[in-house]
Amino acid sequence: MEDYQKYKAYRGNVIYSKNKDTLISKENSYILVREGIVKGIFKELPNGFPKENIIDWGNKLIIPGFCDMHVHAPQFLQRGMGMDRELLDWLKTYTYPNESRFKNPNHAREVYSLFVDELLRQGTLHVNIFPSIHYEASEILFEILEQRGLFAFTGKLNMDQNSPEYYVEDTEKSLVDTEKFIQKHQKDGNVKVSIVPRFTITCSEKLLAGLGSLSEKYGVPVHSHMCEAVNTIKVSQELFPDYKNEAEIFYQNNLLGQRPTIMAHCIFMDDEVLKLMKNPNCMAVHCPDATANINAGGIMPVKKLLEMGINLAIGSDIGSGANLSIARGIASTIQHSKIRNMFDSQWDAVTLPEAFYMATRSGGRYFKNVGAFEEGYCFNALVIDDSNMPGEGYTLVERLERFCYLGDDRNIAMRYILEKEILV
Ligand code: GUN
Ligand code: FE
């Protein structure tokens, strides 16, 4: 007989993705959890299960915590500004001056604390973060993420060319600092290090090759932007005439698919790029709000990539995205797919199960065993109180959809990471 004292049972209306097409929804069920890990979902509890170990959330929804797979921590204060600009103009006018302020560790600590609090408030429990170029600020971000308990990847940003003189690195120093950062964070934990070249335009071939060697030497994942905008692709081609496309620049320099690789945007991908991205190690991140705000010139063909079996997730991409809510990212993903469909009817609109899958289980594969409630998964969960959205006879999935479209952080009644209550 099992020792049920070690178990907790979370009761509510449970929803999670089985795969991209299927949502599992179970009314009035118990998620059985032992030491932070899901054991299973049950309609009834076994005889003798201790009543004091039941946490009853009544009619609320219990869903996996969200994954924000591309977000810029140092852009937290610039959200909602310059949204009428083109990408390169926006970087020069708003972003580089703002990010350069993270040279000051006090500023970094203050802003990164607010940023991480807001992530949690919005229900993001798993996150893949772009930092600034500053070593000390990147350490501070790492430390705050560890303190708050999120599952995260972050590193030290690299850029050594085509950047303003007040926000650029010496190539050698960039590599030395990156290696130091990696070495310091080799230990196991929920926050892990990644290698973060900004994008091809701001990185010399020497820097990219050096980062590729570090990724190989230490087995470190890679996070960058790729195939984002008509303008950036053009500039990249001028800077790297010997390469066929941006994916090849990363690939030839050991930064695409050799280790886990996350590429934000991936809007303009021809067949050769798609072939490189169709690799279990690679994940493309759809950032719909960012795309709309800074005018990339296109919309990611999400349905096509889903049908091709390319790993996909959702990113808030603040500050080109303005909002940290991944629930909003789900709605936005569906909306953008419909707009795209008006111009290219070859691909259907994205469905709610597909978008929810991208935001939870699919993004979650990067962290292992997060984003669903199957046996062995981490109990990283949100409790959703939708009692302020009147309506009768709705299914659980319809209620989930309404939360994504109408809800906000006030509807999140509780956040759990490995079963621990996260207070915001
Ligand atoms: N490409 C290079 N840097 C950035 C950035 O900060 N935001 C976005 N959206 N694209 C980029
Ligand atoms: Fe970005």
Image (cartoon, grey):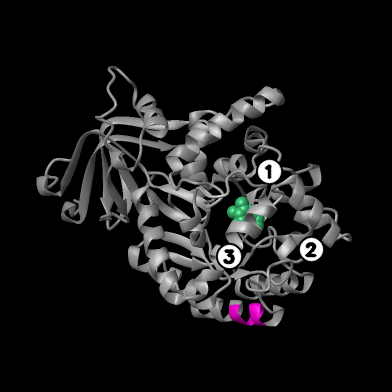
Look at the image and tell me in which quarter the C terminus lies.
bottom left
Q: Quadrant of residue 214?
A: bottom right
Image point 60% across, 63% down: which residue?
A: 96
Mark 3 sits near ligand 1, with its Cβ under 8 Å away: no
Q: Quadrant of residue 221?
A: bottom right
Distance of mark 3 from mark 2, alpha carbons?
Answer: 32 Å
Q: Which residue is mark 1?
A: 296
Q: Which residue is mark 2?
A: 252
| Front tag of 2 and 1 | 1
Relative to residue 148, is residue 334 depicted above or below?
above
| Front tag of 3 and 1 | 3
Instruction: Single out the residue that lies furthest toward the right.
Output: 242
Magenta-span inclusion, residue 175? yes
- Answer with left or right where residue 37 lies relative to residue 246: left
For residue 34, say whether it is visible.
Answer: yes
Q: Are the residues at dot 2 and dot 1 in contact (C-beta closer than 8 Å)?
A: no
Q: Which mark is residue 152?
A: none
- Provide residue 196's location: percent of width, then percent of height: 61, 65
The main secondary structure of the magenta stretch is: helix
Residue stretch in magenta: 173-177
